[in-house]
Amino acid sequence: MVIVGAGRVGSVFVRAGVSVVHRSEVVPVDAPIVLCSQVTHVDDALGRWISPACHSDVVFVQNGAIQPVLARWNIRDATQGILWFAAPGGGEWSTNRASLFRGKHAEAM
């Protein structure tokens, strides 16, 4: 698993020991690729850093506003999830329920 984006959500994965890829770096072809960015940055990530051959291995953790982006990129089999945790800036993260995922990489998540 590789994380794309080291903001508040991505940094939670980083603290758990998962590798992160920053904007200027090439995304490895390993699956799954967890895209932790705002919806407004997803088009850029899909167009510049994530190979089209890997689009089916991207795990989208954005809110419901991601649907138009997936339609625009013709991504039909994406793994999508709702993360149930709080990630305050610079603070510890906490959770009170399990996160929900569906799709190809749901089990890995």
Image (spheres, rainbow, N blue to C red):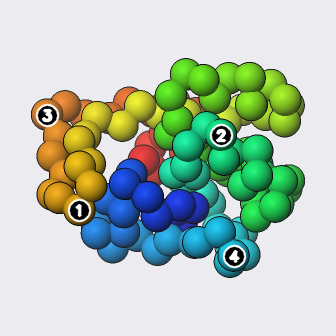
Secondary structure beneath disc 2?
helix
Q: Pick whichever of labels 1 and 4 is earlier in the sequence.
A: 4
Q: Which residue is drawn at 76% across and 60% down?
A: 50
- The foreground one among 103 and 15 is 15
Which three-letter amino acid code belongs to the residue tagged 1? Gly
Circle 3 residues within 10 Å: few <14, some 14–19, many ≥20? few
Give the numbered dot on residue 90. 1
Residue 106 is situated, as x and y percent measured from the top left of the image, at: 49, 39
Q: How far separated are the C-alphas under marks 3 and 4?
A: 34 Å
Which three-letter amino acid code belongs to the residue tagged 4? Ser
Q: Where is 15 relative to 60, above or below?
A: below
Circle 4 residues within 10 Å: few <14, some 14–19, many ≥20? few
Q: How far separated are the C-alphas under marks 1 and 4?
A: 23 Å
Circle 1 residues within 10 Å: few <14, some 14–19, many ≥20? few
Are discs 1 and 2 less than 8 Å apart at CB? no
Q: Mark 4 points at which residue?
A: 24
Give the numbered dot on residue 40. 2
Q: In this view, does 86 lie to the left or right of 51?
A: left
Locate residue 70: give its quadrant. top right
Q: Pick whichever of labels 1 and 3 is earlier in the sequence.
A: 1
